[in-house]
Amino acid sequence: TADADDLKARIFELFEICLQLPQLLFTKRSPGSRAEEYDRNRAWSDKIIRRNILIVLIFQIKSRCFCADFGPIPGEDLPHVSHYYAEAHPFMGQRVLVVGGKNSACEAALDLFRQGAQVTIVHRGAELGDGVKYWVRPDVENRIEAGEIRALFNTRVTAIEDRKVTLATDGEEAPLEEEYDQVFLLTGYHPDAKLMESCGLRPDPGTLKPAL
């Protein structure tokens, strides 16, 4: 859960402080650079290697290197479609579609609503996900009940065009076509193992636990 991830991040921040590890914020690591450096200098001590592996693991957990789950939706690569949500301010007064029914989608919908966006939630399930935080769920449900956030359950996005989104609802023969200025596809993420692989670690395909 997100709360468990926050706790992990705090724990590893303590590791950073105790070990006096340097931090490079808002910095993208070039894939393979560590492996190339290791090839050029094989005289590294075991201590240094272990230290750098620890730095990698801390970075991997703290920065939450997740990749969005892309689905076979035509148009999901258009400029006004995003698999990641950052902030609501640019969308004040705009028609925004949030796809998903779990924490990311619910929190984004609430934030967008409070910044003045016209928000619609589309979720393939009959109700919000069971894992939605206990303090977020009633807030979203109350906004939906009050008509402040529109919700379409048992509904899937089948296509996205310039501003038109095609929706398919279970039990309805005719698809629904609506216009939106922004679409957030917040339907899930998976960990990115490329960083560990570039550092010589071999993550298990199923669990992503690293092995030397």
Image (cartoon, grey):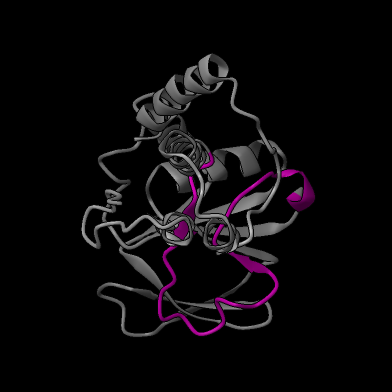
Q: Is residue 179 visible?
A: yes
Which residue shows up at 49% across the image and 50% down it?
65
103 versus 14 height, above or below? below
User: Is residue 64 found left or right of 23 in the rendered image?
Assistant: left
Q: Which residues are magenta?
A: 63-91
Residue pictured at 41% horizontal, 65% vertical: 69
The answer to whether residue 31 shows anywhere in this view is no
Q: Position of residue 171 (x, y in %)?
A: 25, 75
Q: Main secondary structure of the magenta part?
A: loop
Q: Position of residue 209 (x, y in %)?
A: 27, 48
- Residue 191 appears in which quarter of the rendering? bottom left
Q: Residue at x 65, y 52 (%)?
A: 118
Outermost residue, front side: 43
- Rendered location of residue 104, percent (x, y): 47, 45
State which quadrant residue 173 falls in: bottom left
Residue 176: say if magenta.
Answer: no
